[in-house]
Amino acid sequence: MSLAHIFHRHHEPSSHPDVVLIGAGIMSATLGIILKELQPSLKIEIFERLDDIALESSDAWNNAGTGHSAFCELNYTPQHDDGHIDISKAVKIAEMFEVSKQFWAYLIDKNHLQAPSKFINRTPHMSLVWDENIAYLKQRFDLLQTSPLFEGMTYTEDTHQIAQWLPLVMEGRDPSQKVAVTRMELGTDMNFGELTRALFEHLKTLPDVQIQLGHHVNFIERRKKDNHWELEALNLHTKEKRTIETKFLFIGAGGGSLPLLEEAEIPEADGYGGFPVSGQWLVCKNEELVQRHAAKVYGKAEVGAPPMSVPHLDTRIIGGKKALLFGPYAGFSTRFLKHGSLLDLPESLQINNVFPMLAAGMHNIPLTKYLIDQVRQSPEDRLAALQKFVPTARLEDWELQDAGQRVQIIKKDRDEGGKLEFGTEIVSSADGTIAALLGASPGASTAVSIMLELLGRCFPEQMKTPEWQEKLQSMVPSRGHSLGKDAALCRITRARTAKTLELHP
């Protein structure tokens, strides 16, 4: 039992919203709008610890900005020891991103969102490998061609063609080095910060929606008499405390979700822990170089590297201006949030998760070594990594900037005691009155699919009603069908969303 439980003094709640969302990021924004579309009468209150929307993981500088659709991310198509490449995760993620695009297109059609170019722009997605990894990329390409979701992908080892697409990548490269790429013209660059702020702007216009910035939720408890949730929120500016009662609670606070989930003390959360990983970008200062590159280019991760550290050379649109980033360089901090506390990790330790976390640590010693090496990197070391992608890169053209903080999931494992998970996971109570989102990539890109899964868990009866079914079908027209198997539907769906989201060449 936490100190907050011991010293909390119960008093009458000051508000009784139907739904409380913690965290003003892409997940809460998505869930809030879906719920208000399904049931406009719902009273929703949102609490955010910082003083503005989308300042943590959803901010453009704190994530890769890739519309994660598995076109270029090689970590979504792992190669097993027997040489077999598993594309199942890539197919699933590609379809989930199509679901997100359909929902955003629906919001634009309803005039709930405007100016799609502020948050989504067509940007080719490319995978780049050399020498010993070429056979892997070719096999990956051949397997992906079996799914309609990857229709239009091209593969080449032609250095002249690659130089046309990626002049910075090929200039100064050893001509004896063999290089291969895949390219998907349908790729996108995402500014999830802009999207999140636009979603919240719409939420603000809806009746019975309140957004409380600068409020820290430091107490969560289930009321025995009615199974409702009672929260205490501290106004960080006035130091005033409020008690709120709600029927449904969603914790979408990024790296801050785990401590809040532990505070709720639901048995489904037993054994969960978190492993924080920080990141940094090299940002190009040379405008000429920025303008000469126009793609998201992903490589293969170093052995022992976490998925969020897959190296990529990225064209980005941030604040309406084109940018060029390389990274991320991984690091380690005990903070769970970029604006968090150094005590986040030690304070997250509990009797039920200490052993899984220790066991996961023992089974991930290469990762620990990798992170230590990354932290110790000099500017010259970072430049050497960049020069594998841009051989002529000079240190004076790039500056280091902090990226976001991620907390990878650690959970109980029957065989290993504890297991480190790379991905996104919903943890919810058996009665569906509380849910939390843990983990990282592909996260934001798949927010709509994740929230639809959450609704199925937490609002199962409402999900069966004709009213909700009809509304959900209008939000995601392909719902109930597999875009990964139905080529005609996949083409129709992409054509429709491309038109609405202004993604045509």
Image (spheres, helix red, strand yellow):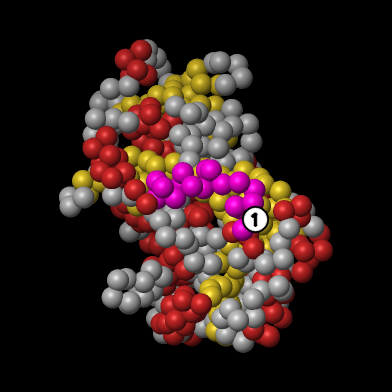
Residue 165 in which image quadrant: bottom right
In the rendered image, residue 163 lying in the magenta stretch gets the answer no
The quarter of the picture where the N terminus appears is top left
The quarter of the picture where the C terminus appears is bottom right
Residue 84 in which image quadrant: bottom left
177 is higher (above) or lower (below) than 227 = below
Q: Residue at x 33, y 59 (%)?
A: 464
Instruction: For residue 40, say whether it is visible.
Output: no
Per the image, label 1 sits on a secondary structure element best described as: helix
- In the drawing, does residue 347 fall left or right of residue 148? left
Q: Nearer the viewer, residue 146 or 34?
A: 146
Secondary structure mostly taken by the magenta-highlighted segment of the chain: helix
Q: How many marks?
A: 1
Q: Residue at x 63, y 31 (%)?
A: 51
**Residue bounds of the magenta highlight:** 367-384
Q: Which residue is mark 1?
A: 383
Q: Position of residue 79 (x, y in %)?
A: 36, 71
- In the drawing, does residue 319 fall left or right of residue 486? right
Q: Residues within 10 Å of mark 1 (few under 14, many from 20)?
A: some
Q: Residue at x 41, y 70 (%)?
A: 77
- In the drawing, does residue 330 fall left or right of residue 185? left
Q: Residue at x 81, y 59 (%)?
A: 287
71 is higher (above) or lower (below) than 385 = below
